[in-house]
Every structure is written in C-alpha cells, then in structure tokens.
Amino acid sequence: MSNQHTDFGTPQEEFWAGSFGDEYINRNTEEKFLASNIAFFSKILSNTSGIKSIVEFGPNIGLNLRALQMLLPSVDMAGIEINSEAARQLKCSLPKAEIFNESILTVELQKQFDLALIKGVLIHINPDSLPDVYDKLANASARYVVIAEYYNPSPVSIPYRGHDDRLFKRNFAGEFLDLHSEFSLVDYGFTWHRDPNFPQDDLTWFLLERRK
C-alpha cells in the first residue's frame, strides 16, 4: 500500500483525510450495504464484457469493491483512498488489491484498468478540481467508466452534516463527456433510498465506454 500524501491542496481533501473521514467509516460498515451494492453493480455489469481489472476512486473501506469481487471473482482490483484508516481496513478486506493511500487529485497511476469507478465521491470534490478528476478517470480507463453521484442539472452546494462546501450536486457525467468525447454513454439509471429490497442513496449512475 502506497504511503499517504499529507499536504492537501483543497479543504475538502483535508476534511476526508481527517477525523470526519474516520467517523464516516463507522457509519458505513453494515452488511446491508454490501447486499445493495451487489444488486446495484449486477445491473451495471450486465451491459459490460471482458472486465478483468477495476480501479475505484475513493473506495473507503471497500463495500463497492467487495461487491464487485463477488460478481467478478477473478478481477484485479485497485483503490485510491485518502483516509489512512479506511485504506488500512480496505487492505485487510481485500489483501490482493493494490491500495493507494493518497488523494485522487495527486495520485499517478502507471497503468489502465478495464473499469474506472467513482461512486459518491465527486459530490465531495472541490468544484475547481473536477476537470482534473475527470482527466484522471479517463486516463485510468482502458474501456469503461462508471460515475454514480447525486445529480442536478445545474451546480448547487448543499450543507452536509453541519458543514458548508462539502457536498455538491451537478451533472458530473455530462461534464465528463463534454471534456472526454472519446467516451460515449452505454446506460444509466437511478437508485432510491426507499427501495424495499436494495436501498441506496438517491444516486444517478452512468456507464460510459471508450469509443472503439
């Protein structure tokens, strides 16, 4: 596991690397999240083929990657996680995965993956840094990108657990496609927190594929 960078360029990075990020871990360990994630990714993966490697930007303790491992048992996995305690737990639960304990704004990946995933993370990125993250997602992907975030047609900032400028809604996938026309839309959908069987946050997800 690579060592963490401690000099962050945005307040949002410091926020998630510190004590608030530690507290977030404790709120997201229930096994019901794993079951919901299996259902979530089953639908997305049904429109893909040949995925042998996955990198997740901001996996926290790995509930998304664990679900994907159950669906694709032989897949190679990597994760970029800014919070050191989350990265430690992630490495324990997925010992074969390559874990980068650093910011997604500064990480330098040396290879591409069949699928680059970001879920519930872009909403917490400083808006000025989003183009850089879109570039990193595109550069990390040999074929697919999955973006799953809160959606709003125009950018808005929403108070998050008593903090300002820590949660943003916007058209993330649309912005990504505007900057990276080498990708096109394959599928999209919505998950609802009141789903009776497999609840998720109210996320809109997009499956994008690199044009051949």
Image: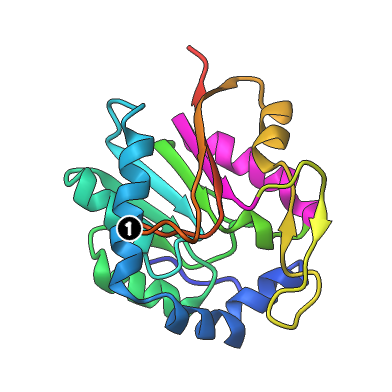
Relative to 120, is 113 on the left or the right? Answer: left
Q: Residue at x 72, y 70 (%)?
A: 12
> Element under label 1?
loop
**Is 80 placed above or below 115 here?**
below
Q: Residue at x 23, y 59 (%)?
A: 96
Confirm whether the magenta stretch covers residue 143: yes
Relative to 110, is 168 on the left or the right? Answer: right
Q: Residue at x 64, y 54 (%)?
A: 122
* Viewer-closest of 4 and 160: 160
Local crowd size for mark 1, using a 10 Å CA cut-off: few (<14), some (14–19), many (≥20): few
Relative to 50, is 199 on the left or the right? Answer: right
| Residue 47 percent location from the top left of the image | 36, 27
Q: Amino acid at mark 1?
A: Asn
| Residue 1 percent location from the top left of the image | 37, 67
Residue identified by numbered label 1: 197
Confirm whether the magenta stretch covers residue 207: no
**Is 104 placed above or below 205 here?**
below
Q: Residue at x 68, y 76 (%)?
A: 14
Q: Quadrant of residue 19?
A: bottom right
**Is 7 placed above or below 44 here?**
below
Q: State whether residue 9 appears in this view.
A: yes
Q: Which residue is the extreme one toward the top?
A: 212
Q: State whether residue 207 appears in this view.
A: no
* Viewer-closest of 97 and 5: 97
Instruction: Please name the colour scheme applied to the rendered image.
Output: rainbow
Magenta range is 127-150
| Residue 15 percent location from the top left of the image | 67, 77
| Residue 10 percent location from the top left of the image | 76, 68
* Viewer-closest of 199 and 105: 199
Q: Quadrant of residue 67?
A: bottom left
